[in-house]
Image (spheres, rainbow, N blue to C red):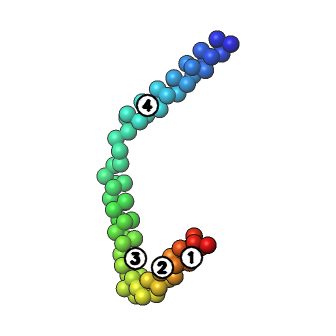
Amino acid sequence: MADLTLTAYVWLQTRLHSLRAAAENEDGLSSVEWVALIGIVVTLLAAIGRAFDANGEQIGEAAVQTLTRWVASLGG
């Protein structure tokens, strides 16, 4: 039983060491990934802005109705 426990312990420590080494070598997002992320955010903000310009009243009414139904379902 002691051999099995020791084997499991060594295996687990080896895996943890590998994970730590991989995490320490991570440099973060590269500049290309940052540019892509910024591009996605800007595109989403532009789409949301256009939707609110075109259908702002409808979107607001739908949001209020949805929240009202949700709050009413919580109360009873």
Q: Where is residue 61 in the image (x, y as percent from the top left)?
A: 47, 85
Q: Is mark 3 on a helix, strand or loop?
A: helix
Mark 3 or mark 2, which has the lower sequence index? 3
Q: Do the residues labelled 3 and 2 touch (CB within 8 Å)?
A: no
Q: Position of residue 36 (x, y in %)?
A: 37, 60
Q: Mark 1 points at which residue?
A: 72
Q: Mark 4 points at which residue?
A: 20
Q: Quadrant for residue 24, please give it.
A: top left
Q: Where is residue 22 in the image (x, y as percent from the top left)?
A: 43, 34
Residue 63 circle label: 2
Mark 1 or mark 4, which has the lower sequence index? 4
Mark 1 or mark 2, which has the lower sequence index? 2
Mark 4 or mark 3, which has the lower sequence index? 4
Separation (CA) of disc 4 from disc 2? 45 Å
Residue type at mark 2? Ala
Residue 59 in sight in this render: no
In the image, residue 36 sits, relative to residue 22, either above or below, namely below
Separation (CA) of disc 4 from disc 3? 40 Å
Circle 1 packing at 10 Å, graded few (<14), some (14-19), many (20+), is few
Identify the residue at image location x=32%, y=59%: 35
Q: Of the residues tagged 1 and 3, which is closer to the observer?
A: 1
Circle 3 packing at 10 Å, graded few (<14), some (14-19), many (20+), is few
Identify the residue at image location x=38%, y=39%: 26
Nearer-the-camera pick, 23 or 55? 55
Q: Is mark 2 on a helix, strand or loop?
A: helix
Residue type at mark 4? Arg
* The C terminus - image quarter: bottom right
Q: Of the residues tagged 1 and 2, which is closer to the observer?
A: 1
Q: Of the residues tagged 1 and 4, which is closer to the observer?
A: 1
